[in-house]
Image (cartoon, helix red, strand yellow):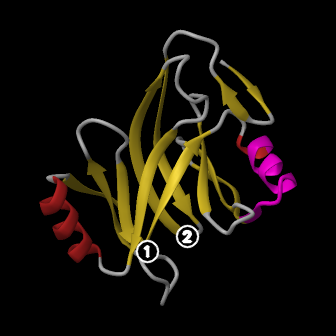
Amino acid sequence: MDSVNGFLRPQGGVTQASWIGAGRGCNIRVAQFHAVFEEDFMGNPFVHVELNTTDVQKAKDFYGKLFDWKMSDIMPGPGGAYTMIEVGEGTGGGLMKHPIPGAPSTWLAYVLVDDIAAATQTAKSLGASVVKDVTEVPRMGWFSIILDPTGAALGLWQSKST
């Protein structure tokens, strides 16, 4: 696996990346996922999807019943527990109380990168706004959150094991 401007470029075979963790400011969240991809897949896979919600219990009830997702509360933080979403096959995720008072509930996807600082800078040079600059999640890795030039939010994640 090599990288260009912080973004992964697969070279063949199977690569496995694992991480536990993510965070935003004083709100601590923990997520766990396993992304396995082959040469035919994109070099920077989506590795985690997170719901920032105005009503945690309502969201847990709804998605648990709708998709039969398993929910596990872990690592309490200032805004409440972070809930892991186990989906079975595919990319898992998490949910938490929205850290911005009055903001609507929203989903945020995270993409795996090889070099978080370089990827964040490359995104900025291509017209993205950095909403949350590179932030370390102890023992886990680093993340940043950007708005692309069209205004869409995206999380970037670098695992300490990458």
Q: Residue lying furthest bottom in this view? A: 102
> In the rendered view, does 35 fall on the left or right side of 146?
left
Q: Which residue is mark 2?
A: 26
Q: Which residues are magenta?
A: 118-130
**Dot 1 lies on which element?**
loop
Going by the numbered disc 2, the residue's amino acid type is Cys
Residue 93 relative to residue 85: left or right: right
- The disc placed on residue 161 is none
Q: Determine contact: label 1, label 2, CB under 8 Å.
A: yes
> Residue 150, position in %: x, y?
70, 66
The residue labelled by disc 1 is 78
Percent position (x, y) of residue 49? 43, 53
Q: Residue at x 74, y 26 (%)?
A: 3
Question: Would residue 11 be found to the left or right of residue 85 on screen?
Answer: right
> Residue 78: where, in percent of width, then height?
43, 74
159 is higher (above) or lower (below) than 24: above
Give the CA distance from mark 1 to mark 2.
7 Å
